[in-house]
Amino acid sequence: MQRTTTTATRQGLDKVATEGSRTAPTAQPTYPLLKMTLVAMCNLTMIYSTLIWIPTWLNSYTHQADQKQDTTNNNSTTLQNAPLPSLSWTLVTLFGLQTVLGLVQWSLHSSSNKGAKKSSKGGGSSSSVFSVLNTSIAIGAVGTLICHVFAVLFGAGIFNQAKETSQLAVYLSLLTFYPASFVLGTDLKSWLRIFVHNSPGTYTEAAFYCQGMMAIFGAWLGSIVIPLDWDRPWQAWPVPCVLGAFMFYCIGTVVGLVVSVVMRQRAARNEFGIGSGAGTAQAGSKKNKSQ
């Protein structure tokens, strides 16, 4: 008798739990299409202006202030003719704009996670802007060191043209490590899962993955034209790698937006029972009911 009563109470509790789970469905996260599109447009505008327009304007402005007679010759100080000063202005402006955009993404990411923190007990205090900025700068410095080491391993000189190599490393770090650090922070498991195991889980992670991997691939692909005997000014180190990273970063931005849309479509299919995961879940629920 005691066994039958305990089994009956257990079955009653299971029925109550299943009914409560059915009546209170979990809220699915909405797809931020407008936010992702605006961030992609900001990335494209920022990367173009910092590499093409802003360095040319700043170089011409500084040279016109020093030498007002050679204005026609000074206006041609671009990345091809003067790589070091142009890349210096590019890195300064790109760092400032990436910091502003990263803080905006961090605030949006933290505000979207407030609901999950409030639902859980405790919640914890959110980190301040200065701590996030310090962490991102530290991660960007580590990323610069990693990019510099890989550039040397792929054939760049250790002491020959070290300034150009360091500028390329900083540029790649500002495109890959630094913007992702505002959202990922010091979570090493997330970094390894996204960039090593190639498995981003959210829309933002997919955008960071596509942008970073395409920028690195573009920098490697741009180095192919350096040893060719074309005698072009844009073949000087590290101009082809910077241009390749620039072009493929723009492609990666668009690809990341498309991948996020595909991820949303797959999630919608699973929600409406079209995907394979939903079919297995329904089959499992039917087996539990029959038991």
Image (cartoon, helix red, strand yellow):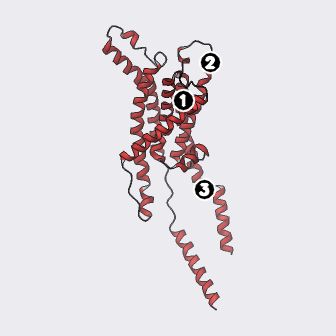
- The reply to whether callout 3 and callout 1 are in contact (CB within 8 Å) is no
Query: Label 1 is placed on what type of residue?
Result: Ala
Q: Name the residue under label 3.
A: 270
| Residue at left offset 52%, top offset 46% | 203
Q: In the displayed structure, does residue 127 sit left or right of residue 235?
A: left
Local crowd size for mark 1, using a 10 Å CA cut-off: few (<14), some (14–19), many (≥20): many
Mark found first going from the N terminus, 2 or 3: 2
**Residue at 51% of width from left, 31% of height from top?**
169
Q: Seen in the image, is 11 located left or right of residue 72?
A: right
- Which residue in the structure is indicated by mark 2? 227
Q: Which of 145 and 105 is in front in this view?
A: 145
- Dot 2 falls on a residue whose secondary structure is loop
| Spot occupied by residue 291 in the image (x, y as percentages of width and height) | 68, 75
Q: What element carries label 3?
A: helix
User: Mark 2 or mark 3, which is nearer to you?
Assistant: 2
Quarter occupied by the N terminus: bottom right
Q: Is 282 drawn above or below residue 34 in the view shown?
A: below
- Foreground tag (3 vs 1): 1
- CA distance separating discs 3 and 1: 36 Å
Q: For this rendering, which residue is in front, 254 or 73?
A: 73
| Residue position for label 1 | 245
N-term mark: 3 or 1: 1
Closer to the camera: disc 2 or disc 1? 2
Q: What residue type is labelled 2?
A: Pro
Looking at the image, tell me whether mark 2 or mark 1 is earlier in sequence order: 2
Categorize mark 3 by other alpha carbons within 10 Å: few (<14), some (14-19), many (20+): some
